Amino acid sequence: MRVGAWTRRATAVLLLFGVGALTGCRTAAPNSPGTPAPPPVDGALSGDPVAGACPSGRTQAAFEAINRLRSDRGLGALRPNTQLAAAAEGHARDLAEHGMRGHRGSDGSMPVERATRAGYRWTLVGENVAGGYSSPASVIGGWMASPPHRENLLQPGFREAGIAWADAGAPTGFVWVLVLGDRAGVPDGPLGCAG
């Protein structure tokens, strides 16, 4: 399937029943050489994509836990990115509002399209989605127990991420979305967030 100048490849979609539901997806196939990424669409974030990107509350706890897992395995920390956070938040809200679960949004969009709409000029994009987990520790535990999600969390090619959650109410509870990415020019190492 083609999206503009990009192609995408979903590596896996997996549902686990009982504890919660999970879906994992990775999009590889960067922009073709010489083909610039399209400009952001209306409503996309502008300016420095990491300025003000420090997560807080549940998202901060999740970010810290993911980076500890990566560090324990000798991988670089993920840097928070506002554009990826916006894509994650929009999808989490959409899933919660429409009682949906998975990578396809109510408008038919897929992770790469949402990241692009948020202004992210990606070379690699991945997404983990989960429902039914009430805490950062439980959702990350669920992702780590699922091979495609674990692969996304521990993928060395991802250097930035945004994470969001939305309360879908009973019976689903929290819907979590983690959007991971890489783009040209990302410095190595974490962003120094205060707190």
Image: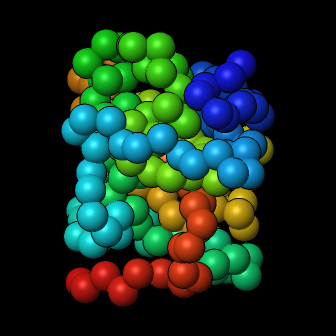
Nearest to the observer: residue 116 or residue 163? 116
Q: Give the side of residue 187 with respect to residue 58, left or right.
A: right
Q: Residue at x 51, y 64 (%)?
A: 160
Q: Reply above or below: 110 against 128.
A: above
Question: How far from the left and from the top, in percent, is residue 23?
Answer: 60, 31
Question: How far from the left and from the top, in percent, is residue 137?
Answer: 46, 57
Q: Is residue 68 visible?
A: no
- The number of callouts visible is 0
Q: Quadrant of the image for the N terminus?
A: top right
Furthest toward the front, the residue is 34
Question: How far from the left and from the top, in percent, is residue 120?
Answer: 45, 51
Q: Residue at x 40, y 66 (%)?
A: 80
Q: Give the side of residue 70 with respect to residue 163, left or right.
A: right
Q: Residue at x 56, y 41 (%)?
A: 127
Q: Is residue 193 visible?
A: yes
Nearest to the observer: residue 3 or residue 85? 3
Quarter location, residue 184: bottom right
Q: Reply above or below: 185 against 3.
A: below
Q: Which color mode does the image show? A: rainbow
Question: How far from the left and from the top, in percent, is residue 123?
Answer: 64, 53
Nearest to the observer: residue 15 or residue 185? 185
Q: Reply above or below: 9 against 2.
A: below
Nearest to the observer: residue 193 or residue 134? 193
Quarter location, residue 15: top right
Q: Residue at x 63, y 78 (%)?
A: 76
Q: Reply above or below: 100 against 194.
A: above
Q: Quadrant of the image for the C terminus?
A: bottom left
